[in-house]
Image (cartoon, helix red, strand yellow):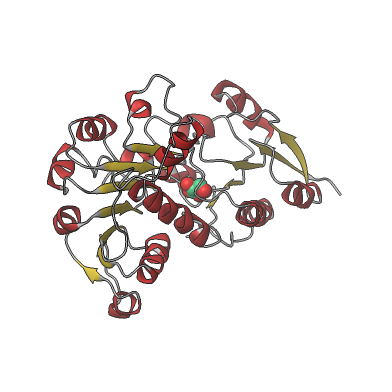
Amino acid sequence: MTKFRVLITRQLPEVAMHAIREFAECDVWSEDRPMPSSVLSEKIAEAEGLLCLLTDRVDAALLSRAPRLRVVSTMAVGFDHVDLAACSELGIPVGNTPGVLTETSADLAFALLMTAARRVVEGAEYVKNGLWQTWSPTLLLGQDIFGATLGIVGFGRIGQAMARRAQGFGMRVLVCHSRSLPDDVLQTHQVERVSLETVVGESDFLSLHVPLTPATHHLINRDALSKMKRTAVLINTARGPVVDTEALCQALLEGKIAGAALDVTDPEPLPATHPLLSLRNCVIVPHVASASIATRHRMALMAVENLHAGLRRRCLPHCVNPDVYQ
Ligand code: DGY
């Protein structure tokens, strides 16, 4: 039986590669960096399926070079790197990997909150640099998490998982969400729903969990940062451009907010000379919120399921442009 031809833009966990080889001939980009767009647009010409990552831009220009493409499957929950309208226009379904990374991503968001609050990175560097001489009543004082107010912007799956973690720390949780939310979701998570202005102004820790859309681009801008408490910490595990990087840099430098803990940045990655990297009060990790072994395996397998369904012209189990089936 002839196998489908698929383009895979990075080496995936072996369990997923094995599953794909059962039904497809794979062209896999073996380097551990994004496939250059010129290579992608050349290789896409033959592909019936594309399994891509959030580092690949799938836009109308690329799709115009993909006459045989039946499906785009991204190994991510976020799909801001894919032009959905262009895919729908061409009848190409797009799959993502929701749900399986929720708890892992919330773990990292909460870890960043704790790291920033208790100055864990500074403490570790202090010890490594041989500066630890004695116990001191004033050394590396941080902020309490217990009893503090956590603000969650975007109360979807990951935002809700963050709230569950906050409950265990006795936090007051304020949430802001752009769409309707059933009352029982608020009750179950013991959270108060407030406006963006209130969540920004009253939170000790402000954690972002919105997708990147035109409406959320630079949602946290100079104005929002100026309304935060001077003692507040911003946590971003959503997408870099949800925060205006220049405004954040300035707010951190001028002490308008106490700190930031970022899993995502804009640009991503940050150049080595970027001013954010020299700030003591800014902790940055390299977009690893979903990076547990088990979760990455689940994401890869889910991406394979979407790919397989699309190649066979069946409905994708997790389709983000269902209008394509109308
Ligand atoms: C996603 O899936 O969108 C995350 O940002 C990476 O796991």
Residue 199 or 320: which is nearer the viewer? 199
Quadrant for residue 306, please give it. bottom right
Residue 252 or 72: which is nearer the viewer? 252
Residue 215 or 231: which is nearer the viewer? 231
Q: Farthest residue toward the top? A: 273
Residue 145 or 102: which is nearer the viewer? 145
Give the image location of residue 118, x and y in percent.
36, 49
Does residue 264 appear anywhere in the picture? Answer: no
Quadrant for residue 294, please give it. bottom right
> Along the horizontal axis of the image, is 54 left or right of 162?
right
Give the image location of residue 260, x and y in percent.
31, 42
The image shows residue 302, relative to residue 270, as above or below, that is below
The image shows residue 98, relative to residue 91, as above or below, that is below
> Along the horizontal axis of the image, is 117 left or right of 22?
left
Report the residue at 86% width, 49% height from top: 1
Give the image location of residue 175, x and y in percent.
26, 63
Q: Farthest residue toward the right? A: 1
Does residue 190 appear anywhere in the picture? Answer: yes
Report the residue at 33% width, 63% height from top: 155
Q: Looking at the image, how many numbered discs can be counted on the residues?
A: 0
Give the image location of residue 257, x and y in percent.
21, 42
Q: Farthest residue toward the front? A: 134
The image shows residue 76, relative to residue 271, as above or below, that is below
> Along the horizontal axis of the image, is 56 left or right of 7?
left
> Along the horizontal axis of the image, is 28 left or right of 227?
right
Report the residue at 60% width, 56% height from top: 295
